[in-house]
Image: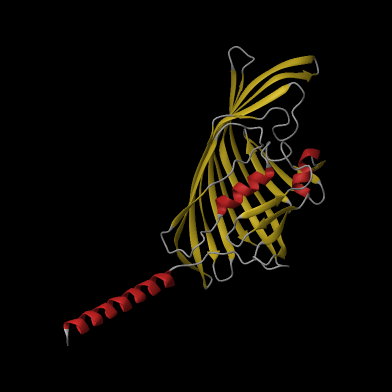
């Protein structure tokens, strides 16, 4: 065999080996994409357990009066997702509706059971039925609609009328909150990925445009492995993230309902860290389950003059939330 023939043969062998190595690499990679099908309806069971401490300080008293309370809650609720339409690019228009919310609450040694029925517009506390507070109804009763790409990008958000700033979730902008939540859970890379691949996500702040403080959020997802779930090969995607807010001036209208005139609330500093994992079925293009743990520390300051039974009353109080741990699981029903 000539030297030239030997070189050509060696080169051909090396080329074939490279092709084989590349094919093996491609075989190990998984393309992560949602598959939206118009008309499909998915019902999730959401279970969330919260523990932590809340310290309240009355700064109008000398010395300052301080009370610390241990808090525990467990909430369960169904959430229905309906795929209303799918466009030519595979983007799904999805509506979300909450079902009855059951909550067990233990606070300060006292336990109570609460059930909120969005469809009936009622709230039951320890068996006694009450009307649902008006400011909560838009966020609970109305359909939330989102357009989500096959990669999991949230392209648009439509909130129920009246479910905006200050009406739900303590003054957080619901559209931005849902956008952050969706990106935090899972936005997929453009290319197929192998086990060990990590990617980052930039998450927008879930607050109104009036807030000028910087809000840094870092979320990293990792293709952690492949798991067999009831005979289905699923990708496990782990996630870690953190966000810090120096100060969030809520102003009037911040909080779970409108603040009385003359009152002001400020939130911050606030730290939130999150870790969790999702199981995703690449063949079916759907989530199998999600679990996430959120740890939060937050300070809140309320001040101003409030009208009381005996006339105007000065209010100056601090609320500190510490080691608030929220464990949440989401599974199909």
Residue 262 in the image, given as x and y percentages of width and height: 75, 21
Q: Can residue 117 be seen in this view?
A: no
Q: Is residue 249 above or below residue 140?
A: above
Residue 207 in the image, given as x and y percentages of width and height: 64, 38
Q: Is 304 or 213 nearer to us in this picture?
A: 213
User: In which quadrant of the rendered image does the C terminus lie?
Assistant: bottom right
Instruction: Give the residue furthest to the top.
Output: 62
Residue 26 in the image, given as x and y percentages of width and height: 42, 71
Residue 95 in the image, given as x and y percentages of width and height: 72, 57
Number of callouts = 0
Q: Is 285 or 293 nearer to us in this picture?
A: 285
State which quadrant residue 57 falls in.
top right
Judged left or right of residue 11, residue 267 is right
User: In which quadrant of the rendered image does the N terminus lie?
Assistant: bottom left
Q: Which residue is drawn at 43% across and 73% down?
A: 27
Judged left or right of residue 144, residue 272 is left
Q: Which residue is drawn at 62% across and 43% down?
A: 73
Q: In this view, does 136 lie above or below 23?
A: above
Q: In this view, does 153 lie above or below 15?
A: above
Q: Which colour scheme is used?
A: secondary structure
Q: Which residue is drawn at 66% across and 30% down?
A: 250
Q: Is residue 102 visible?
A: yes
């Amino acid at each position: 065999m000539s030297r030239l023939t030997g070189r050509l043969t060696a080169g051909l062998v090396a080329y074939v080996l490279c092709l084989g190595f590349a094919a093996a690499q491609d075989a190990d990679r998984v393309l992560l994409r949602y598959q939206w099908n118009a008309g499909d309806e998915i019902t999730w069971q959401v279970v969330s357990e919260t523990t932590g401490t809340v310290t309240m300080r009355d700064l109008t008293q000398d010395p300052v009066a301080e009370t610390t309370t241990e808090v525990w809650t467990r909430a369960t609720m169904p959430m229905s997702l309906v795929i209303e339409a799918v466009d030519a690019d595979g983007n799904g228009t999805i509506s979300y509706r909450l079902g009855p919310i059951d909550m067990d609450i233990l606070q300060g040694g006292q336990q109570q059971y609460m059930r909120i029925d969005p469809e009936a517009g009622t709230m039951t506390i320890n068996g006694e039925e009450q009307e649902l507070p008006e400011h909560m109804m838009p966020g609970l009763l109305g359909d939330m609609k989102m357009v989500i790409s096959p990669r999991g990008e949230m392209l648009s958000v439509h909130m129920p009328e009246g479910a905006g700033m200050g009406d739900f979730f303590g003054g957080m902008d619901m559209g931005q909150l849902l956008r952050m939540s969706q990106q935090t859970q899972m936005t997929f890379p453009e290319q197929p990925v192998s086990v060990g691949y990590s990617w980052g996500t930039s998450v927008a702040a879930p607050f109104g445009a009036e807030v000028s403080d910087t809000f840094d959020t870092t979320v990293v997802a990792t293709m952690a492995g492949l798991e067999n779930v009831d005979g289905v090969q699923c990708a496990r995607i782990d996630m870690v993230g953190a966000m810090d807010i120096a100060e969030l001036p809520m102003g009037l209208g911040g909080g779970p309902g409108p603040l009385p005139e003359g009152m002001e609330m400020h939130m911050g500093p606030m730290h939130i860290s999150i870790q969790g994992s999702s199981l995703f079925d690449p063949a079916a293009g759907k989530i199998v389950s999600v679990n996430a743990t959120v740890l939060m520390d937050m300070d809140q300051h309320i001040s101003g003059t409030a009208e009381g039974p005996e006339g105007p009353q000065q209010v100056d109080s601090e609320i500190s939330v510490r080691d608030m741990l929220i464990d949440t699981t989401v599974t199909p029903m």
